[in-house]
């Protein structure tokens, strides 16, 4: 026997699935009828999304680097900020251009370029953040922030003493 709560949940899922499907199909049909406008809006959205996500990731990476190599960042401040701006803006422009190319023809969807652009726009900032965190963890391990204790035998102590 299925519990009452599970029955209610199954009924709710089945009852909501069809109206949501109808809304999705009608929304998709509307977007396809206005495909040129949709293409322009999605390209602009990809540019804005790339700028925002990559800026957040660059800020996190710069903040972590500032803790570990402040002298280097102070000495080459303008070069580093220029490189950060070039990477952030360049990756956002590449992502939006690939989005524009991928949405060129509605009859050729799904398109490889659009999928690659979306994956790039999502994964690039996460990759920057992961690398910055790995760098931060590696620096803490070597500076003594998180030291592993050696086994009891290596420390010269024996159990029970």
Image (cartoon, rainbow, N blue to C red):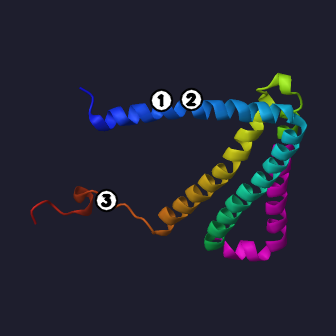
The reply to whether discs 1 and 2 touch (Cβ–Cβ < 8 Å) is yes
For the question of whether residue 94 can be seen, the reply is no
Q: Can residue 133 be seen in this view?
A: yes
On the image, numbered disc 3 is attached to which residue? 150
Residue 93 counted in the magenta span: yes
Provide the residue span drawn in magenta: 69-97
The residue singled out by tag 2 in the image is: 18
Q: In this view, does 92 lie to the left or right of 10?
A: right
Vertical comparison of 44 with 137: above or below: above
- Name the residue rendered at 45%, 69% in the picture: 145
Q: How many marks?
A: 3
Point 79% across, 47% down: residue: 46
Nearest to viewer (mark 3 / mark 2): 2
Image location of residue 134, percent across then percent down? 56, 55
Q: Which disc is residue 154 wearing?
A: none
Q: How far apart are marks 3 and 1 (CA)?
A: 57 Å
């Amino acid at each position: 026997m299925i519990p009452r709560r599970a029955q209610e949940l199954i009924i709710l899922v089945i009852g909501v699935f069809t109206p949501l499907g109808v809304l999705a199909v009608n929304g998709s049909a509307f977007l396809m009828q206005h495909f040129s406008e949709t293409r322009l809006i999605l390209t602009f959205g990809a540019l804005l999304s790339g700028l925002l996500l990559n800026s957040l990731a660059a800020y996190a990476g710069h903040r972590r680097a500032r803790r570990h190599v402040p002298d280097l960042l102070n000495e080459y401040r303008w070069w580093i900020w220029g490189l950060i701006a070039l990477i952030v803006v360049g990756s956002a422009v590449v992502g939006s251009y690939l989005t524009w190319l991928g949405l060129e023809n509605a009859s050729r969807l799904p398109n490889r370029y659009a999928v690659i652009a979306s994956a790039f726009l999502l994964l690039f900032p996460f990759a920057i953040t992961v690398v910055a965190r790995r760098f931060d963890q590696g620096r803490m391990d070597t500076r003594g922030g998180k030291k592993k204790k050696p086994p009891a035998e290596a420390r010269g102590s024996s159990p029970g003493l």
